[in-house]
Image (cartoon, grey):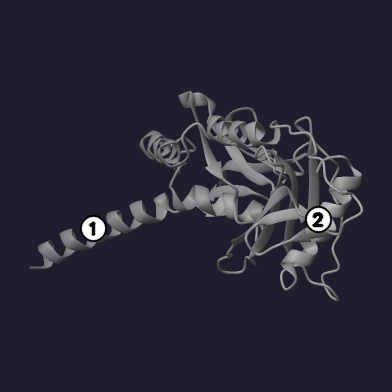
Amino acid sequence: MTARLLKLSLIFCITTSIVRAQDLNFDKKSGEFTNGTTVIAKLEDEKNRSQGGKNYFIKDSSDQTELLAFILHKFEDTMGSASVYYYEMRCTPLNLSAYRPNFTGMLNTFKEVGEMVLAKNLIQPDAKINESNMRSYFAAATSDMGDYPKILKAKNDSMEALVNIDAPPVERDMRKPVTANEYGKIGQGNTVIGNWEFIENKGTGINSSTYLFRIKNLAGGIICISWISLSGAHTYTYKGGARSQENWKVPDLINNNPIQHKQEYVEELSRDLIRAGLL
């Protein structure tokens, strides 16, 4: 009985030591991944000024070999909606590449990246890449995101087609007031000169809703987009497929909120579009 207990005790001790050996820690300040007191890898970041954020690199303890990298990309579509941030991922030693959504960045992206590497078990205690897990991580990202830049470009191409539909302003009595009715028509006097749409994109969680006014010429070409949210507004015009500078018009969100006065806001935009020769 004593011999059996001793044997069980030895098995328990060996098993416990293996579990401990597999435990890795991440220091969110230094960026070091440690196995006990041994540094096996390190997370580094660098500013990506052109994209307005940071890139992240996990390197081995010698700082010579890159194990995993996240390169930030920003995409802004023709319509001027909120910029889409995403990361290009690469694992050069395994010749892997994929894309992933932006990190939440709510508190500390540096910490989030490091903790994700631990949670996915992408690095082994011996400082080597966990090849099976790394391949699975990239495969899942590819399944979720696909060729993300290509997908974004395809969506944007369809938008560009809409802003490239020109139509000369129709003849009408320019002395008459501009009106916008509840049926999406914009008129001047008795003549329809364009169309308008209002779209609400409901937010989820901490994200507030955004509201979109879209004005088209009679041929269906988009000539004006006005985005409105709690954080402010962005209005763009389109002429010959080219987008104007941001904040072409900033509405009065307090005294004359466009969401409560939709038709009045469309009429205001339309008057400016007429002066610009777009409507």
Q: Which mark is residue 274?
A: none
Quadrant of the image occupied by residue 64: top right
> Can residue 14 be seen from the camera position used here?
yes
Q: Which mark is residue 10?
A: 1
Q: Residues within 10 Å of mark 1 (few under 14, many from 20)?
A: few
Where is the C terminus found, in terms of image quarters?
A: top right
Q: Is residue 272 left or right of residue 149?
A: right
Q: Secondary structure at mark 1?
A: helix
Q: Nearer the viewer, mark 2 or mark 1?
A: 2
Q: Residues within 10 Å of mark 2 (few under 14, many from 20)?
A: some
**Viewer-closest of 179 and 96:** 179
Q: Which residue extends farthest bottom?
A: 255
Q: Give the x, y percent position of residue 277.
A: 87, 40
Eyeballing the image, is 47 above or below 93? Answer: below
Count the marks: how many? 2
Quadrant of the image occupied by residue 53: top right
> Can residue 27 be seen from the camera position used here?
no
Where is the N terminus found, in terms of image quarters?
A: bottom left
Q: Give the x, y percent position of residue 86.
A: 61, 42
Q: Residue at x 86, y 59 (%)?
A: 177
Q: Which mark is residue 189?
A: 2
**Viewer-closest of 254 and 113:** 254
**Distance between the Cα atoms at labels 2 and 1?**
94 Å
Q: Earlier in the sequence, mark 2 or mark 1?
A: 1
